[in-house]
Image (cartoon, helix red, strand yellow):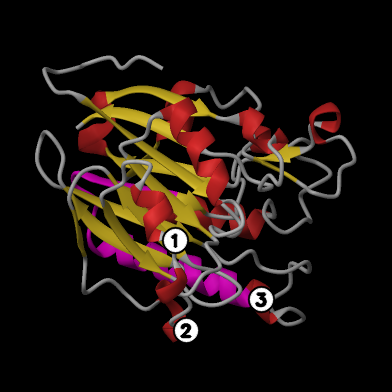
């Protein structure tokens, strides 16, 4: 995939993927790198405590800079980079749970440092009711904290990526009407995520390239016998950029074929190229 230079700066490729176990799917990272050639790869659901993270295998793919925040069995985030990164020490402990759902770094970029945030927002369980389902309440509280955090510090030279577990637009899901009461597309979740985006002055980088009236998915359930034929997807994975970086956006990719890989994740990698 050739690169396009813009504004006199070499473009930067940032990819995000809910890998659903980094040790199980480590071999698939080679295929991702071959297809997208990312400079930075943000992973969610690594499901791996820090001491067991497969640094050697990841380094062999060219990612000489790595920061991980993981735990045994679930959650976990990682940022793998070919460019220097520095951990942001003072970002919040969301909902006071210490459950490894966010990693923030300062990324060395051609135009100067970029604030990069990798998020894994709680899925929220199956019942869209705070009283009946504490997991849903946790999801809403997490998003509310993120909204307040962003509103207090509007983004500048910043990028936010990750599995946000909410498909906000009508064509981010296979059926808007049928999924209105399904967790990930309920009105209360959509309103909450939209408030986060608006409050932080974030720009939706994927919808920058794909108009809102076109279908766009990044996740297909394991429950479908033939996920490609059914094509009942949702856009749960996102890339947001601050307004001052919008002019540098050059291209995007949603690696749909990755859903058909052997031992695939139910999410597929997403990449944005930006002259930054």
Left-right relation of 222 to 265: right
Is any part of residue 197 visible from this angle? Answer: no
Kindly indicate whether the residue at mark 2 contacts the one at mark 1 (C-beta within 8 angstroms). no
Who's the residue at 72% across and 59% down the image? Answer: 183
Could you say whether the residue bearing mark 2 is in a helix, strand or loop? loop
Give the residues drawn in magenta, as a range: 137-161
- Secondary structure, mark 3, is helix
- What residue does disc 2 label? 97
Label 3–label 2 contact, CB within 8 A:
no
Q: Is residue 236 above or below residue 188?
A: above
Q: Quadrant of residue 11?
A: top left
* Residue that carries the numbered disc 3 in the rendered image: 135
**Magenta part mainly helix, strand or loop?**
helix
Count numbered badges in the picture: 3
What residue is disc 1 on?
54
User: Was residue 246 drawn as part of the magenta stretch in this picture?
Assistant: no
Q: Is residue 74 left or right of residue 82?
A: right
Left-right relation of 177 to 247: right
| Residue farthest along the right direction in this orientation | 225
Q: Is residue 111 above or below residue 253?
A: below
Q: Residue at x 24, y 58 (%)?
A: 105
- Pointer 3 local density, CA inside 10 Å: few below 14, some 14–19, many at least 20: some
The residue drawn where x is 42% and y is 52% is 57
Of pointers 3 and 1, the one earlier in the residue sequence: 1
Up/down of 90 relative to 43, above or below: below
């Amino acid at each position: 995939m050739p690169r396009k230079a813009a504004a006199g700066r070499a473009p930067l490729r940032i990819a995000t993927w809910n890998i659903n176990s980094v040790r199980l799917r480590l071999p698939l990272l080679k295929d991702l790198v071959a297809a997208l050639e990312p400079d930075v790869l943000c992973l969610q659901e690594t499901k791996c405590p820090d001491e067991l993270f497969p640094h050697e295998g990841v380094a062999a793919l060219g990612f000489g800079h790595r920061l991980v925040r993981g735990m045994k069995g679930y959650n976990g985030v990682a940022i793998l980079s070919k460019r220097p990164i520095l951990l942001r020490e003072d970002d919040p402990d969301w909902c006071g749970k210490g459950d490894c759902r966010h990693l923030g770094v300062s990324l060395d970029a051609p135009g100067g440092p970029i604030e990069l945030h990798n998020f894994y927002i709680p899925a929220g369980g199956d019942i869209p009711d705070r009283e009946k389902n504490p997991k849903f309440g946790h999801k809403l509280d997490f998003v509310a904290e993120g909204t307040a955090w962003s509103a207090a510090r509007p983004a500048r030279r910043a990028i936010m990526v990750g599995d946000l577990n909410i498909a906000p637009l009508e064509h981010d899901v296979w059926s808007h009407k049928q999924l209105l009461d399904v967790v990930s597309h309920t009105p209360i979740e959509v309103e909450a995520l939209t408030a986060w985006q608006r409050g932080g002055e974030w720009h939706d980088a994927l919808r920058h390239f794909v108009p809102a009236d076109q279908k766009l998915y990044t996740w297909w359930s394991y429950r479908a016998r033939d996920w490609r034929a059914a094509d009942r997807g949702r856009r749960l994975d996102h890339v947001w950029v601050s307004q001052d970086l919008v002019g540098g956006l050059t291209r995007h990719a949603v690696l749909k074929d990755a859903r058909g890989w052997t031992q695939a994740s139910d999410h597929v990698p997403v990449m944005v190229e930006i002259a930054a």
